[in-house]
Amino acid sequence: MARAEEDLALTGVMQHRYDEPEKLLRHSQGLIEGQLGPANPRLTNSLFAFAALLTAEHRYAEAVAPAERGWQILHSMNLSLAKADLATACTALSTVYFRVGRTGEALSMARQAVDLAEAVVGRNHPCVVRCLSNYAYILKHMGRKDQAKEIQKRADAISKTLPAVVVDGNTVNIAALH
């Protein structure tokens, strides 16, 4: 049930309908916490979806808590089991930090996301492209345009080697949230 509610909520967010997704995600979190406990890794999907919803609604300060909580749950797990999830979490957290003006932390998390993604899925994967693009976006908006341009060129080069349609799970694209 929790997964179905998360899927419905994400569909609403993608369609720029924000009223129902918040209720669905809060209920999903309650179901997971009630059945599996407040620190269960399954909860992170709902927490990061909630942070993405709040970010899409420009409620950046409110998005920090669920993103940080999701990060803490994943970070406390056995890292060998969670590196792919940690890369996505770093990207989500970098987005939230960037939006609330915590640019140093945003940059650090974005760089960490790239490193984790490359370690888990290799250097030529769509997840790495998204992490690199988010990293470049943050660099650009911090005034480090030359460095951002080089990072984005690398992301674009990888992207050109990939099939036209690739689906590999949910991640946050900071450029799509402004």
Image: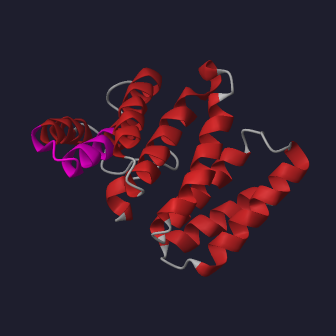
Residue 107 against residue 33 in the figure, above or below: above
Percent coordinates x, y for residue 8 in the rendering: 65, 68
Residue at the right extreme of this rendering: 35
Q: Nearer the viewer, residue 20 or 5?
A: 20
Percent coordinates x, y for residue 42 in the rendering: 73, 43
Q: Residue 159 lies in what quarter of the image?
A: top left
Task: Residue at 16%, 47% (x, y): give it.
Answer: 143
* Magenta-colored segment: predominant secondary structure: helix
Q: Nearer the viewer, residue 38 or 84?
A: 38
Magenta highlight range: 132-146
Residue 92 against residue 14 in the figure, above or below: above
Q: Is residue 126 left or right of residue 10?
A: left
Task: Residue at 69%, 64% (x, y): give it.
Answer: 25
Residue 79 lies in magenta, yes or no?
Answer: no
Q: Nearer the viewer, residue 92 or 128?
A: 92
Residue 75 against residue 59 in the figure, above or below: above
Count of labels in the image? 0
Percent coordinates x, y for residue 117 in the rendering: 43, 30
Q: Nearer the viewer, residue 142 or 112?
A: 142
Q: Is residue 120 left or right of residue 33?
A: left
Percent coordinates x, y for residue 19 in the rendering: 61, 80
Location of the C terminus by quadrant is: bottom left
Q: Is residue 152 left or right of residue 170?
A: left
Examine the rendering and report whether any part of residue 58 can be seen.
yes
Location of the N terminus by quadrant is: bottom right
Residue at the left extreme of this rendering: 146
Examine the rendering and report whether any part of residue 172 can be seen.
no
Q: Is residue 53 left or right of residue 27?
A: left
